[in-house]
Image: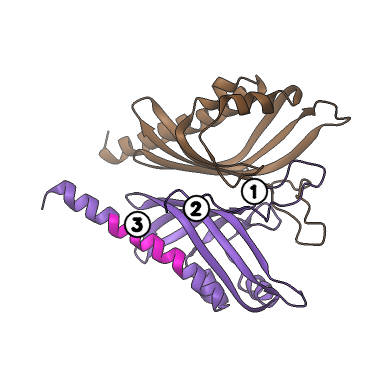
Chain colours: A purple, B brown
């Protein structure tokens, strides 16, 4: 096998590992398992969440559990159109995630698409999230309401 | 010079080049120059903006000019706490940007901090933005209003 073929093969495996990590993020939320949610993050990961403050440093287990407890039943995350770029032991990935579920006391489901960017570093244990950026755009009118009604375009993915 | 010292030196230079690109992004907005705004982006860059839709593919000059025309005077972007990671010809950077300026017809300035993530690839001409994610978190209460009142924490930077 040529060196180039090996490189392509390795990159393919690395991309698969990052996509597996993303699938694991969804599974952990579906199962509402705070430890499994925290597992792929670096201790001091810079996390830009939907909710304030501007940044969270790493995942706080108690805070995550409190958030999980506001949901009635599973939280479903459906990733779509995720593009992964690998550069040695560094990677980034971005795409869309549909989040659905029922908040306790609510009379209908939460259901919207968010944008997700992940920056990753590989150590001996595998890929770790060092930065996450999750957001919903907002309408630039008097309402400044989050655009919960958007859907990813279909580009053949 | 050892191979390691050379590598550190190169990484330092690469980080400086990415920070220079970010300074150029601010300058282009201050000067309200649509071409200079578009210059550092890859043609098909996946741009997650403050405003809908979920994604813009590359910078549209006419759309950028129309946006610039909604401002009265310069738009100031002040980057803060930007962390840059270099991995060969791939890089990512994230931090905060304070945006200030006056919208036409408004009686006071726009002034808020946003989160910014950039993913970059280097070609023969230098670093290009292949992905940008800009956002403001929103309050998870009945208002769902954007959190325009947040400021980056000071961590000695």
Element type at marker 1? Answer: loop
Q: Magenta span covers which residues?
A: A12-23
Taking depth in this image into account, of B92 and B142 the one nearest to the observer is B142
Q: Which mark is residue B155?
A: 1
Q: Based on the displayed image, in which of its 4 quarters is residue B138 positioned? A: bottom right
Q: Based on the displayed image, in which of its 4 quarters is residue A47 positioned? A: bottom right
Q: Based on the displayed image, in which of its 4 quarters is residue A30 positioned? A: bottom right
Q: Main secondary structure of the magenta part?
A: helix
Q: Viewed as shown, does residue B30 lie left or right of A1?
A: right
Q: Are marks 3 and 1 in contact (CB under 8 Å)?
A: no
Taking depth in this image into account, of B124 and A137 the one nearest to the observer is A137
Q: CA distance from mark 3 to mark 2?
A: 14 Å
Subunit bearing disc 3:
A
Vertical position of residue B70 compared to residue A27: above or below: above
Residue B41 screen position, x and y as percent: 49, 31
Residue indicated by mark 3: A15
Mark 3 residue crowding within 10 angstroms, few (<14) / some (14–19) / many (20+): some
Say whether mark 1 and mark 3 are on the same chain: no
Single out the mark in the foreground, 2 or 1.
Answer: 2
Q: Quadrant of the C terminus of chain B?
A: top right
Q: Which mark is residue A65?
A: none
Q: CA distance from mark 3 to mark 1?
A: 34 Å
Sequence-earlier tag: 3 or 2: 3
Q: Is residue A13 a member of the stretch shown in magenta? A: yes
Subunit bearing disc 1:
B
Element type at marker 2? Answer: strand
Element type at marker 3? Answer: helix
Q: Residue at x 79, y 34 (%)?
A: B110
Q: Viewed as shown, does residue A116 lie left or right of B8?
A: right
Residue indicated by mark 2: A95
Q: Quadrant of the N terminus of chain B?
A: top left
Say whether mark 1 and mark 2 are on the same chain: no
């Amino acid at each position: 096998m040529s060196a180039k073929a090996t490189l392509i093969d390795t990159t393919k495996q690395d991309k698969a590992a990052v996509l597996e990590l993303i699938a694991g993020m969804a599974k952990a939320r579906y199962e509402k398992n705070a430890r499994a949610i925290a597992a792929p993050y670096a201790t001091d990961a810079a996390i830009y969440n939907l909710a304030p403050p501007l940044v969270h440093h790493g995942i706080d287990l108690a805070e995550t559990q409190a958030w999980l407890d506001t949901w009635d039943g599973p939280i479903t995350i459906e990733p779509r159109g995720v593009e992964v770029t690998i550069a040695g032991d560094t990677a980034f990935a971005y795409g869309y995630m549909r989040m659905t579920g029922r908040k306790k006391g609510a009379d209908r489901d939460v259901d919207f698409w968010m944008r997700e960017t992940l920056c990753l570093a590989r150590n001996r244990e595998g890929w770790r999230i060092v930065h996450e950026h999750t957001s919903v755009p907002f309408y630039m009118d008097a309402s400044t309401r989050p655009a919960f009604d958007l859907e990813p375009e279909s580009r053949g993915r």
